[in-house]
Amino acid sequence: MQRVDNWVTRFEENVIALLLAAMTIVTFTQVVARYGFNSGWTGALELTRILFAWLILFGMSYGVKMGTHLGVDAVIRLFPAPIFRILAIFGALCGVAYAVILLHSDWLQWFGISTRGGAIDYWSRMYRIGIGLDDLRYPELVQETFGTQERVQRWIAYLILPVGLALFAFRCAQAVWQILTGKREMMIAAHEAEELVAENKNVLKD
């Protein structure tokens, strides 16, 4: 399990670093081209939006790993330690359920819930249809060399949906195990209110 965790962590960190670098480079070069040479790249805005969406979905799972998601724990901390632990596990399991439902919701029909689809189904549909993005196009050299379509296919951009949700499900399941084994208190970081109170406790005195 530790080896898998290390591999996933390196994967998340490397991809997040690449996404940040790519967003910075694309935005910087577009600004220079527009204001310095009165030109620019038509697909730059769309590419930046896609990179930002990938960054959010990768950051969602990495945030669980690092315990940086914000939450409110004022109520559950009023309970005794065993109940607090049960509630923390329940919260992490809700994260797993959330990710699994969004990945593929057909299994909910076993419980009499009429629903279907999910990220995997949506991505598969985009792959079969092969619709291109609005503005993002392959360079002419790539089109001529590999015989690709003019526009970048949507399934490439939407690949992050199943990948990101699968990573999120893995991290939430990992959090459940860590809470069970005592390696972690809860899935979220929820001490901002206490820190604000501590920082401003002398404000009224002044």
Image (cartoon, helix red, strand yellow):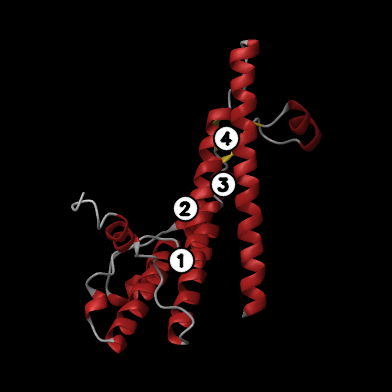
Tell me the distance, in whole angstroms, between the alpha carbons under discs 1 and 3: 31 Å
Disc on the earlier residue, 1 or 4:
4
Figure label count: 4
According to the image, label 3 marks what residue?
A: 155
Other-residue count near label 4 (Cα within 10 Å), few / some / many at <14 / 14–19 / ≥20: many
Tell me the distance, in whole angstroms, between the alpha carbons under discs 1 and 4: 29 Å
Tell me the distance, in whole angstroms, between the alpha carbons under discs 2 and 4: 20 Å
Establish if 168 lies above or below 183: above
Residue shown at 57%/49% (left/top)? 127
Residues at marks 1 and 4 touching, judged by CB atoms closer than 8 Å:
no
Front-lying residue, 24 or 125: 24
Other-residue count near label 1 (Cα within 10 Å), few / some / many at <14 / 14–19 / ≥20: some
- Quadrant of image for the N terminus: bottom right
SS under mark 4 = helix
According to the image, label 1 marks what residue?
A: 67
Residues at marks 1 and 2 touching, judged by CB atoms closer than 8 Å:
no
Disc on the earlier residue, 1 or 3:
1
Disc on the earlier residue, 3 or 2:
2
Whether residue 53 is visible, yes or no, is: yes
Three-letter amino acid code at the position of disc 4: Leu
Residue shown at 61%/59% (left/top)? 12
Front-lying residue, 195 or 3: 195
According to the image, label 4 marks what residue?
A: 47
According to the image, label 2 marks what residue?
A: 122
Establish if 40 lies above or below 54: above
